[in-house]
Image (cartoon, rainbow, N blue to C red):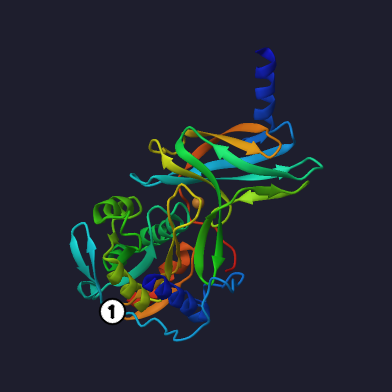
Amino acid sequence: MKRSSIAILLAAAVSAGILSCLEPGPASESSQAPLELATPPTGGDFTLDSAAGPVRLSDLRGQAVLIYFGYTACPDICPTNLVSIAKALRSLHPAELDRTRVLFVSVDPERDDPEHLARYVAYFHPNVLGLTGTPEQLAQVAKRYGAAYQRVEDTGSAMGYLIDHSAFTAVVDPNGRLVQTLGHASPPETIRAAIRTALGTEP
Amino acid sequence: MHAIRTLFAGVLLSGASLTLSAAGLEVGDPYVRAVPPGQSNSAAFMSLRNISTEDQALIGAESPAAETVELHTHVEENGLMRMRRIGRIVLPAGETTTLAPGGLHVMLIGLKSELTPGQNVELTLIQDDGERMVIQAPVRRLEPMHHAAH
Ligand SMILES: [Cu+2]
């Protein structure tokens, strides 16, 4: 109950147009609480688990960091974004690539343990790290970065449960500041430009 | 046997990946997404052109490649991508309905083996009039979307 109300609040924050790339779809009065207390994402440090141990955002100072929230059972939305991000990474100069990391944060810790995540992200690009944490940790990190997600139990699907989730990519600069968000299915060129802006290299 | 071969050749000539049902449903460019190792779900996409004068609907699908096959859609609502199972995909007479990333798809849940690009996945599309249409959908590697204004 507590978690779902947080998710609704976050969804409301997203719909407030904070993430202007995400165009709100047809409004559903029934499933969304009225907008209040929506705070813009502030970014900030966090620690989450990877297969190689805890990863702190503060350990990645000096690098541009892209943060995407999703889950591996997602057959379409998450792979679409990861493929675009991977293509952007492959188009960077080696010196830029050295200073770029992508964090795929799974909001489905029940199905995605760090080992599974490591295998999943390696398929896309070696600079992508798969991270997850406790539901409480994830809720806190998602809130800081303006990401929303909501577990949906009763779907009538063999999936068991689904996770509705926002699908943007947050861009953090080498000083650890959240500087930009990129909408779902942003083309690789847009992602590369955002990385270069964050790094302060050639546009 | 001879008749079947002739028919098959005719289908091959009519287009690289076009399959036509008796009820007048044309399936174009079907494919299944290759997925990372250990990933248990994938999705199939295609275009469905109803060249008959009657509305039709897809009410289900089956595949030997997955434990369960469902019809799904994605809707974006208040910034959230929501995937949902749907009971039918309506195919209006004379129109083309496209199953594409980010929207309608045939969801393969519980893949029985790894999907290798180039391999074909057999899919049976079940129409509301009871007709069952068997198609072969090649496995394709994921590509970034060439996408229009957003
Ligand atoms: Cu689906």
**What amino acid is at disc 1?**
Gly
Where is the C terminus of chain A found, in terms of image quarters? bottom left
**Label 1: element kind:** loop
Mark 1 closeness class: few <14, some 14–19, many ≥20 residues within 10 Å: many
In the rendered image, residue A23, in percent from the top left (x then y), is placed at 56, 72
- Quadrant housing residue A103: bottom left
Look at the picture and state if B147 lies above or below B69: below
Residue at far top of view? B1
Q: In screen coordinates, is B10 left or right of A62?
A: right
Where is the N terminus of chain A found, in terms of image quarters? bottom left
Q: Chain of mark 1?
A: A
Residue at far right of view? B53
Q: Residue at x 74, y 36 (%)?
A: B24
Q: Nearer the viewer, residue A56 or A147?
A: A147
Q: Nearer the viewer, residue B46 or B61?
A: B61
In the rendered image, residue A109, in percent from the top left (x then y), is placed at 31, 59
Look at the picture and state if B133 lies above or below B39: above
Reading the image, the residue beneath label 1 is A176
Q: Nearer the viewer, residue B94 or B92?
A: B92
